[in-house]
Image: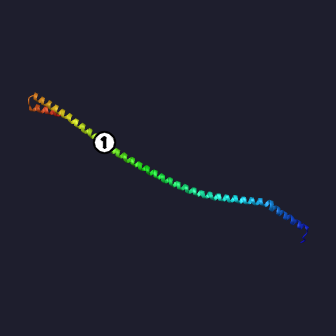
Amino acid sequence: MNINLTFFGQMISFGILVWFTMKFIWPPLNAAIESRQKTIADGLAAAERARQELKDADSRVADEIRKAREEATQIVDRANQQYNQIVDKAKVDAVTEGARQKAAAQAEIESLSHQAREVLRQQVAALAVSGAEKILKREIDQARHRDLLDALAKEI
């Protein structure tokens, strides 16, 4: 191998190329690479934060759903209690009203019965007086007396 002036020229050209590359090309490339690495690292960190926030949100949603179910159960229980109270009150009111109506009907029946007895007594008294008048107006005869009593019995 011959080391000649061309070889030294190539070495000097190569040195200038290396110096030019290190001075003007390498820093922007290095900056672009570092920027890209930082962007990728930030994206991965953001994805990890998002994944963690999603887990947290899922747990909060599960807690809220559990709380909502418990509250719904409590509301249903309170509604059932109110329903039972209303039904019980309605039953008591119905029994009370039935007893009141029964007592009123019983009182009305007794009043009507008493009135009917009074009317019947008045009619029997009138018939007795009428029968006695008829008997006294006629002579006392057994056959007539029996006929009058039969007629009186038919009228009663």
Callout 1 crowding tier (Cα within 10 Å): few <14, some 14–19, many ≥20: few
Give whichever of 128, 34 is nearer the camera.
Answer: 34
Q: Which quarter of the figure has residue 43?
A: bottom right
From what the image shows, is residue 85 above or below residue 109?
Answer: below
In screen coordinates, is 16 left or right of 38?
Answer: right
At x 87%, y 65%, the residue is 12
Q: Looking at the picture, how far across and down is residue 2, in whole percent?
A: 90, 71
Q: Where residue 131 appears, x then y in whole percent?
A: 14, 31
Q: Is residue 13 above or below residue 60?
A: below
Q: Position of residue 152 (x, y in %)?
A: 16, 32
Q: Is residue 149 above or below residue 86?
A: above
> Would you identify the image quadrant in which residue 29 lies?
bottom right
Residue 103, how many percent across, how many down?
Answer: 28, 42
Q: Nearer the viewer, residue 142 or 137?
A: 137
Q: Residue furthest front?
A: 23
Foreground of the two, 98 or 13: 13
Please name whichever residue, 131 or 74, is drawn nearer the observer in this view of the structure: 74
Identify which residue is drawn at 42% across, 50% down: 80
Residue occupied by mark 1 = 100
Tell me the SS state at disc 1. helix
Q: How many marks?
A: 1
Q: Quadrant of the N terminus?
A: bottom right
Horizontally, residue 99 falls left or right of residue 155, namely right
Looking at this view, name the residue that lies furthest to the left.
140
Q: Residue at x 61, y 58 (%)?
A: 51
Q: Quadrant of residue 138?
A: top left
Q: Is residue 151 visible?
A: no
Q: Is residue 72 left or right of residue 51?
A: left
Q: The C terminus lies in which quarter of the figure?
A: top left
Please state which amino acid type lies under the numbered disc 1. Arg
